Image: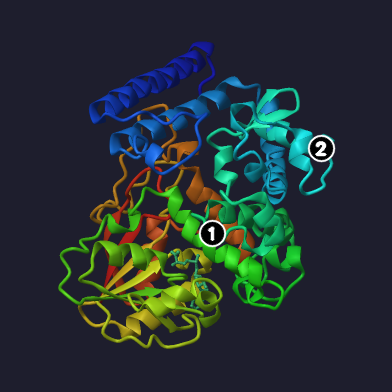
């Protein structure tokens, strides 16, 4: 541990150099590609994100975020940092309020002058004085701008809360707010509601001797928060929760926007597969990953397996289109019915479940695998917060270390897998896993991990572990 002042200052200077060098790199990358770097004041949109999605810009951005957040932690008085950390649970509470008062839609056409909070609070008949404090708190975290006292306007971050639907439509059809959207608002809804409440009971579950070592999917913070014995997937299907199930399905689709477009296409030679190869998307939800694959690789066939109720209550038109076939399948209870799959795809599935459930899922797939079947596990492969040598024998597993003095896992630039890890624990006793952990599960179930793909530093649930039967 550094104790002398000059060490601490050397760290600050090194961090500031990383930031400066990588801003120059961003500038050069944008210039070389003739693209504008997106403004933090302009609304978010996939086209205007093009510069940020350039591989070199992503790497530069990741190093800047890593260095800047480390710099803040080093410079801010520790009690202030700790106070900010323990108080950060108010952020999702505030985000839920603005989401459910449709503030983003109310401000949609307000332009840079924004609107007075009285106007923002009126359509949902909320207290403007309280809403102003909520919005000011968020503006302090760069979500919305307070342009003049009590007048709030959009910026890039707050525009992610906007469904682009009219306020009148949402007020008349509250259950349809997220339908037909890219899904980020549904992600925000699920996180700030079910997940946030589940997380607030996580400590109770982990500290209670009766549940401390329990890995049951229905013995979680979620179960305490909602006072139910059902796991979250069963609970979503109980009468009265239809809108939550729909929101969750749209949220899963929306999580794609947290990765570069087409992230599922990377890291595996889909093109090299023979004509008519069959991809079975196990627990494929509304089939959004299979659709992306089908659109880009029309020579492949797809079957999306999930619990019946899931797709019928989400996107029935996908079932009717025929491009992707849907099949009811319970991966915890049933033998895998497809015996001639070329690929079993498991995206964001293993992370939902504790090890005993994953072993069941993997054994069912192994029993149905042909010698040529490939298993592609797409999940976050969570790095230790220090250097890791134990998986370097697996092709693709090695990670490039960032420059000193950054954390080996890039800290806040790589925060999402650690957030989803705790989220999975709070909701289902699931978890994100290290490469070693995934390898162990595969080895216990007759699979061998042969290739790892890390992908973009800013992508969500895009890392791939490719396995073959043994
Ligand atoms: C986190 S979502 C992932 C969806 C999709 N693979 C993706 O990447 O967007 C988990 C999916 O597992 C499905 N699921 C949960 N329990 C299941 C079970 N026992 N059998 C089959 N599917 C299940 C859920 O309905 C949901 O669609």
| Quadrant where the C terminus is found in the figure | bottom left
Kindly state the secondary structure of the residue where label 1 is placed: helix
Judging by the rendered image, the residue that carries numbered circle 1 is 251
Judging by the rendered image, the residue that carries numbered circle 2 is 128
The answer to whether mark 2 is within 8 Å of ligand 1 is no
Q: Is residue 275 left or right of residue 223?
A: left
Kindly state the secondary structure of the residue where label 2 is placed: helix
Counting residues from the start of the chain, the first of labels 2 and 1 encountered is 2
Q: Say which of 37 and 428 sits in front.
A: 37
Q: Say which of 274 and 377 sits in front.
A: 274
Q: Position of residue 316 (x, y in %)?
A: 48, 76
**Foreground label between 2 and 1:** 2
Q: Position of residue 192 (x, y in %)?
A: 66, 52
Instruction: Report the coloring of the rendering.
Output: rainbow
Indicate the quadrant where residue 272 lies: bottom left
Count of numbered labels shown in the rendering? 2
Label annotation for residue 179: none
The residue drawn where x is 45% and y is 49% is 258
Q: Say which of 33 and 388 sits in front.
A: 33
Q: Position of residue 406 (x, y in %)?
A: 42, 30
The residue drawn where x is 42% and y is 73% is 318
Q: Say which of 142 and 44 sits in front.
A: 44
Residue 272 visible here? yes
Figure check: 93 above or below 177: above
The residue drawn where x is 35% and y is 68% is 290
The residue drawn where x is 67% and y is 50% is 167
The Cα–Cα distance between marks 2 and 1, rounded to whole angstroms, is 29 Å
Q: Is residue 425 left or right of residue 90?
A: left
Residue 429 visible here? no
Mark 2 surroundings within 10 Å by alpha-carbon count, few (fewer than 14), some (14 through 19), many (20 or more): some
């Amino acid at each position: 541990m550094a104790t002398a002042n000059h060490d601490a200052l050397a760290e600050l200077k090194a961090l500031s150099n990383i930031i400066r060098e990588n801003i120059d790199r961003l500038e050069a990358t944008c210039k070389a590609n003739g693209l504008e770097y997106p403004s933090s004041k302009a609304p978010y949109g996939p086209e205007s994100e093009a510069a940020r999605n350039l591989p070199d810009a992503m790497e530069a951005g990741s190093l800047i975020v890593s260095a800047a957040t480390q710099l803040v932690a080093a410079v801010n008085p520790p009690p202030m940092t700790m106070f900010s950390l323990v108080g950060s649970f108010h952020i999702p509470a505030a985000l839920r309020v603005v989401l459910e008062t449709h503030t983003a839609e109310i401000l949609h056409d307000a332009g840079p002058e924004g609107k007075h909070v009285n106007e923002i609070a009126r359509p949902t008949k909320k207290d403007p004085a309280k809403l102003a404090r909520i919005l000011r708190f968020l503006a302090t975290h760069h979500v919305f701008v307070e342009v003049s006292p009590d007048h709030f306007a959009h910026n890039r971050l707050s525009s992610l809360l906007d469904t682009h639907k009219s306020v009148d439509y949402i007020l008349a059809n509250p259950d349809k707010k997220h339908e037909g959207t890219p899904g980020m608002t549904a992600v925000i809804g699920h996180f700030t509601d079910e997940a946030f409440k589940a997380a607030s009971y996580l400590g109770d579950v982990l500290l209670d001797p009766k549940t401390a070592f329990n890995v049951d999917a229905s013995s979680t913070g979620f179960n305490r928060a909602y006072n139910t014995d059902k796991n979250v997937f069963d609970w979503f299907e109980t009468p009265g929760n239809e809108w939550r199930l729909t929101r969750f399905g749209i949220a899963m689709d929306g999580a794609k926007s947290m990765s570069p477009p087409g992230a599922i296409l990377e890291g595996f030679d889909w093109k090299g597969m023979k004509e008519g190869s069959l991809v079975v998307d196990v627990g494929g939800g509304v089939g959004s990953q299979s659709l992306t694959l089908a659109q880009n690789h029309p020579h492949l066939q797809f079957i999306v397996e999930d619990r019946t109720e899931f797709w019928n209550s989400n996107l029935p038109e996908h079932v009717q289109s025929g491009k992707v076939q849907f099949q009811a399948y319970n991966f915890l209870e049933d033998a895998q019915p497809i015996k001639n799959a070329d690929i079993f795809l498991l995206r964001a599935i293993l992370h939902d479940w504790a090890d005993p459930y994953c072993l069941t899922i993997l054994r069912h797939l192994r029993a149905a695998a042909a010698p040529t079947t490939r298993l592609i596990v797409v999940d976050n492969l969570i790095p230790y917060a220090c250097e890791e040598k134990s998986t370097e024998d697996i092709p693709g597993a090695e990670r490039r270390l960032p420059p000193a003095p950054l954390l080996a896992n890039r800290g806040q630039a790589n925060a999402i897998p650690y957030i989803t890890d705790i989220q999975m624990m709070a909701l289902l006793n699931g978890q994100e896993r290290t490469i070693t952990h995934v390898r162990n599960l595969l080895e216990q179930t007759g699979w061998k991990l042969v290739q790892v793909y890390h992908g973009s530093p800013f992508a969500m649930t895009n890392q791939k572990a490719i396995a073959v039967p043994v």
